[in-house]
Amino acid sequence: MLEGNLAPSFRCGRSVLANFSNTRALYAGVLGAPPSSKMEVLGGYPSKSSSPKAKTLTVLLSMTVGVGCLFLLQSQLWPRKTTDFYSFEVKDAKGRTVPLEKYRGKASLVVNVASHSERTEENYASLQELHRELGTSHFNVLAFPCGQFGETELGTSRDIEAFAKSVHGVTFPFFGKIKIMGSEADPAFKFLTDSVQKTPKWNFWKFLVNPEGRVVRFWRTDEPAESVKREATALVREIILKKRVEL
């Protein structure tokens, strides 16, 4: 893998150095060097007969070649990494791409939901209550359906959203059905589980994300809704107070 990444960089270096050889010849002609003057091996410096200007230009060109190839090598070996939850893009229930960046600056409670779990009714009720009380100005519940736990979520993304809204009366955002475990885990949700170094064992795990996109707390399925409400409310209060101070 490393050799594959390095090969384009070395080819780049050889190509640039070949052009550099032609450029040196051009500079030598402009500065008055005889056409028959011998040029040094690539990467070397001009002979003593070369002018100071030619030496300076040679050094500058050598530095440019080196910096350019190092930059290319770095971009191939160390690609830019996503650093927070809001940096990801996901699909909504209709299959449209949604940048989570739209939720930056707010608190988010991210939940892996299911339509036919033994805890579906109580969780949807408490999540909707929290979503309504804290409002969407500073807080959102973000629901991600997952069908990896038995047969608790078998429908399509559209069916799941329609069921939750019609039967349980939820109004918070629903996203497309995803996997949260294994090699096919959704990258955004994987960021959450990697942050807490825990893998959900069942439906309705909850991750509280701060305005900067960092996970500050998580809850398992059987943990009380009162704890979730208390922590989420405290985070929203912090956001409101901070905004007042900034004003």
Image: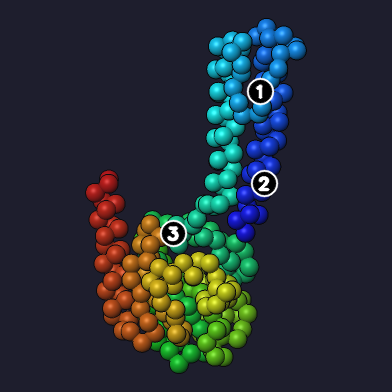
Q: Which mark is residue 8?
A: 2
Q: Which mark is residue 11?
A: none
Question: Looking at the image, is 30 positioned above or below residue 189?
Answer: above
Rounded to the nearest angstrom, the CA distance separating label 1 from label 2 is: 26 Å
Circle 3 crowding by C-alpha within 10 Å: few under 14, some 14–19, many from 20: some
Q: The residue under label 1 is which amino acid type?
A: Glu
Q: Residue at x 35, y 78 (%)?
A: 219
Name the quarter where the N terminus is drawn. bottom right
Quadrant in the picture for residue 220:
bottom left
Among all residues in the image, which is located at the extreme right? 36
* Helix, strand or loop under label 1: loop
* Residue 127 vs residue 97, the one in the foreground: 97
Among all residues in the image, which is located at the extreme top? 32
Q: Which residue is mark 1?
A: 40
Residue 172: % across, % down: 46, 71
Q: The residue under label 3 is which amino acid type?
A: Asp
Q: Which residue is mark 3?
A: 84
Q: Residue at x 75, y 12 (%)?
A: 36
Q: The residue under label 2 is which amino acid type?
A: Pro
Residue 76: % across, % down: 59, 50
* Helix, strand or loop under label 3: loop
Name the quarter where the C terminus is drawn. top left
